[in-house]
Image (cartoon, rainbow, N blue to C red):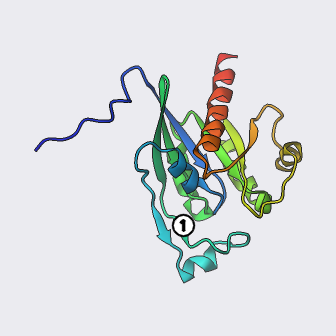
Amino acid sequence: MASALSDSRVSAEHIPVKLVIAGPFGVGKTTIVSALSEIKPLNTEEVLTQAGTLVDDLTGVSDKTTTTTAIDFGRLTLPGAVLYLFGAPGQTRFQVLWDELVRGALGVLVLADTRRIDESFAVLDLVENAGIRYAVAVNHFPDSPDYPLESVRKALDLDPRTPLMVCDARDPASARASLIALVEHVRELVLS
């Protein structure tokens, strides 16, 4: 039996980079991995059950019908690097996966939602406790209130050096810009 070779865009000259996409439930992690991935992304989306609606807080995302039950995975090749994207599930019951998921990761892109900004604290705590570098992207939803980024920075108590940007997880260019900001931030920290 013959097998196909991997995508020719990924060569020995490409540095493999593991990045994690994190954030609270319903913030757009699956969406951003799907928008960025050059391969068919692995999504572990399942329909929300009645029992799940009793466990998961659907405030602000009441029209959400699916949830990630393990991880999302995608790949994006950039000049000189291939980014392996791992989307973390947002519910607290999946935090047991966290240590394994971030092991070996260069950084974490934390997605935030201004409709439910307080839900970002638990994720930021996980990231900071892991000692991993991160950037924050505010995923803009049609009904999201618009706040100046400095107000969001203050509300999240972010270090002034932590990259913070607005992102539309559905838009590949916007999502890519967020990832590039994360990678550049990590690069600056490593080189300094």
Judging depth in this view, the residue of 156 and 47 nearest the camera is: 47
Q: Which residue is mark 1?
A: 67
**Residue 135 appears at what percent x and percent y?**
69, 39
**Residue 85 appears at what percent x and percent y?**
50, 43
The quadrant in which the N terminus is found is top left
**Residue 121 appears at what percent x and percent y?**
75, 54
* Helix, strand or loop for disc 1: strand
Report whether 32 appears left or right of 61: left
Where 21 sits versus 57, above or below? above
> Residue at position x 46%, y 49% from top?
73
> Residue at position x 38%, y 30% from top?
9
Residue 185 appears in which quarter of the rendering?
top right
Judging depth in this view, the residue of 131 and 118 nearest the camera is: 118
Callout 1 amino acid: Thr
**Residue 103 appears at what percent x and percent y?**
51, 39
> Residue at position x 62%, y 43% from top?
175
Report whether 154 appears left or right of 107: right
The quadrant in which the C terminus is found is top right
